[in-house]
Amino acid sequence: MMDTIAAIATPHGKGGISVIRISGKDAIDITSKIFKSKTPITEAKSHTIHFGKVVDFAGNVLDECLVSVFREPHSFTGENVCEISCHGGVLNTNKILEELIKNGARLALPGEFTKRAFVNGKIDLAQAEAIGDIIDSQSDALLNKAVNQLGGILSEKINQVRSRIINLLAQIQVEADYPDEDIELWEREDFVNEAKSIYEEVAKLLESTKSGRLVREGVRCAIVGRPNVGKSSLLNALLKEDRAIVTNIPGTTRDVVEDFIQLEGIIIRLADTAGIRDASDEVERLGVKKSEEYIKNSDMCLFVTDISSPLCDEEKEILKRIEDKKYIVVLNKADLENVQKEEDYNAPAVRVSAKEGIGIPELEREMVKLLSLDEISKDREIITNIRHKEALIRAKEALSRAFGTISAGMPADLLFIDLTEAAEALGEITGLTVNEEVINDIFSRFCLGK
Ligand code: GDP
């Protein structure tokens, strides 16, 4: 039986209220030792809220609080749970927590409540990860995907594909037990077709991780062009329209200064890569290298040019560098004489005046179109998690090995091994077949009290 854990579930600091969470077999008993209410909470029904006072060992009142009682198994963790809502001060909150510890609770580790929910079968691993994503989300799109994942959309999909593989495994087993059937499995069209369809399903899920990366990490967008065409003016004009509040996107390098906007709920990381031209100065050369690297790793570029003067050689050079990337030509300074026009380019082009703020919504629409951001935003079956992606890669590899076995007409035992591996890889996503180390790693990244 697991011990009883307690932690402050709200951010540390002053606020309207603080919540202290207690979970475990003795959660209600321990809380009742410090909480005095009209009906003792030991007699309280599940899902009830009680007003009362928290009193320490010496009888001093520490605070007036509300305690919510949840009885097992109908709680987030599946165990008895109390949530003490006290006044949002640092000292009173900590003192209440201390009293709980003195009365037999243990301080919870980061993510331990959610881990218990997983261990007790209240949620699967993908759903637990979704909770982490909801807390960490900085964009509407990631929040939306995380909420869907918590609701079980991803788990359901994965379980479906997995059970179809298990069905194939069962057929192989039957074949092995009754070998005198006259047709070999791989000569049976329905068996092979089903294997193919499963493979395609897994490949599709894996393909969705490309969009998933954009949802999780944001779109890397490099603003390129020769000096003075209005790159920084454009950056400012875009920021004015849709500035996104972003503190820190995980996994991003901060070598090039980025600013953030949101389009269709997806973060666009805009970087003005000034200094892409050849430089003699050492520091500047380093800057150039970083810019080039940024462009190489970018998902799209905005090529800014001055519409009032013809394209020069330096600009043609820049265009050459980005020709393999997705890019939009920004014909800036459209308030001046228009010497260049959209048709001069093989890429989408938009007339803009960064200075006057003209053409910015049109430019944004082109950006959305170029990367299909609206579709990515709406798609409910996009995988955003790298751990899930790795599991899908293994599942896909195992399935393609299975095809090798089928086409070579090899013994069914070999097919059994590959299909089992594919099923196991998928099971890792929902936590059915995952090892303790991975589980601990996932929950250790949660915050305290979660
Ligand atoms: P960067 O070197 O490419 O970053 O260019 P800047 O943004 O610093 O702009 C260079 C000059 O062009 C500045 O004097 C801006 O005021 C001017 N500029 C930028 N955008 C426009 C525009 O849309 N119209 C006009 N007329 N001038 C602009």
Image (cartoon, helix red, strand yellow):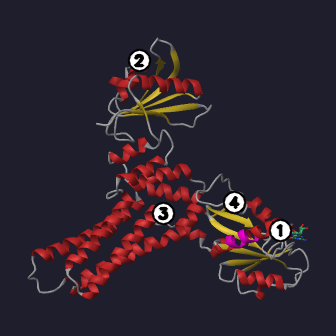
Is 213 positioned to the left or the right of 330 in the image?
left
Q: CA distance from mark 3 to mark 1?
A: 38 Å
Q: CA distance from mark 1 to mark 4?
A: 17 Å
Helix, strand or loop status at disc 4: strand
Percent coordinates x, y for residue 62 in the rendering: 52, 18
Residue 413 lies in the magenta stretch: no
Q: Residues within 10 Å of mark 3 (few under 14, many from 20)?
A: few
Is 185 positioned to the left or the right of 111 in the image?
left
Residue 293 lies in the magenta stretch: yes
Q: CA distance from mark 1 to mark 2?
A: 66 Å
The amino acid marked with disc number 2 is: Lys
Q: What mark, if any, has residue 198 been given in the picture?
A: none
- Of tags 4 and 2, the one toward the viewer is 4
Extreme right residue here?
A: 337
Residue sitting at 52 percent across and 51 percent down? Answer: 134
- In the picture of the structure, the residue carrying the numbered disc 4 is 260
- Of tags 1 and 2, the one toward the viewer is 1
Q: Quadrant of ligand 1?
A: bottom right
Q: Are marks 4 and 3 in contact (CB under 8 Å)?
A: no
Percent coordinates x, y for residue 6 in the rendering: 43, 32
Helix, strand or loop status at disc 2: loop
Q: CA distance from mark 2 to mark 3?
A: 50 Å
The image quarter containing residue 246 is bottom right
Residue sitting at 21 percent across and 87 percent down? Answer: 187
Q: Are marks 1 and 4 in contact (CB under 8 Å)?
A: no
Q: Give the magenta-colored segment's residue range.
A: 288-294
Whichever of labels 1 and 2 marks the residue nearer the N terminus, that label is 2
Percent coordinates x, y for residue 120 in the rendering: 32, 45
- In the picture of the structure, the residue carrying the numbered disc 1 is 354
Q: Residues within 10 Å of mark 1 (few under 14, many from 20)?
A: many
- In the picture of the structure, the residue carrying the numbered disc 3 is 386
Check mark 1 vs ligand 1: CB closer than 8 Å? yes or no. Answer: yes
